[in-house]
Image (cartoon, helix red, strand yellow):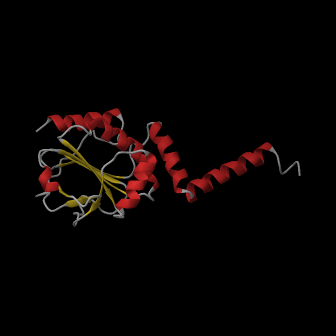
Amino acid sequence: MRKILNIKNISNAVLILFFIAIIIVPSAKAMVLVGLMKAGLFSPDTSAPAAQPLRDLSGIQFKDINGKITDLGDLKGKVIFLNFWATWCPPCIAEMPGVNKLYERFKNESDIVFILADADGNLTKSQKFMQRKKFALPIFSVASEVPEVLFQGSLPTTIVFDKQGRIMYNEAGAANYGNQKFIEFINRLKTTN
């Protein structure tokens, strides 16, 4: 019995249980990702944004919890932060603290709009998630077709448009949007016409 319960075997068992928890429990996976983001990994790369124009953002619509429709075409002249996410998605959950930090930094600025589009379209569930996590992020459901150039189905996906409606950032996967580099990126977009 003493040979089985030695330090090496116990530490190996704990390590195996840790990895099983990460695989099975989405919130455990999200916690690991949050820790990696805080360590500096998963930083969004804004160094060389390739501006990609869309012909027209009109008709790309999102609906808030009150039923109000927001059309991206009506937001010309504003910087748009668009994030596709889901409550069951560990990378989405992991990046929410950073997204919330970014939102808190810019929420009172009229020339910046945040749209967090719940890929499942269950705004009641999304609202409860936001309240439980104490996030004040504006949630929407998709209310129209979304061009594949914007969203190909990977969660999370984040797109940032400049004031002319050009895609300045488009990435699938979790990132820390609350870091100083990304805040500076949004500030640059905000001040350029």
Q: Whole-percent x and y of residue 177?
A: 35, 41
Task: Give x and y (percent) for residue 102.
Answer: 32, 39
Q: Quadrant of the C terminus?
A: top left
Can residue 144 be seen from the camera position used here?
Answer: yes
Tell me if residue 184 comes above or below residue 99 in the rendering: above
Question: Would residue 22 appear left or right of 187 to someone viewing this image?
Answer: right
Q: Nearer the viewer, residue 81 or 129?
A: 129
Q: Residue furthest right?
A: 1
Residue lying at 57% horizontally and 59% vertically, measured from the top left: 24
At x 49% / y 50%, what residue is drawn? 30
Q: Residue at x 34, y 42 (%)?
A: 44
Q: Nearer the viewer, residue 163 or 124?
A: 124
Q: Nearer the viewer, residue 69 or 156?
A: 69
**Vertical side of 100 occupied by 71: above or below:** below
Q: How many tags in the picture? A: 0
Can I make out residue 86 in this image?
no
Q: Where does residue 121 sit, x and y in percent of width and height?
A: 33, 64
Position in image of residue 25 (x %, y %): 56, 57
Outermost residue to the front: 66
The quarter holding residue 192 reads: top left
Q: Residue at x 43, y 53 (%)?
A: 129
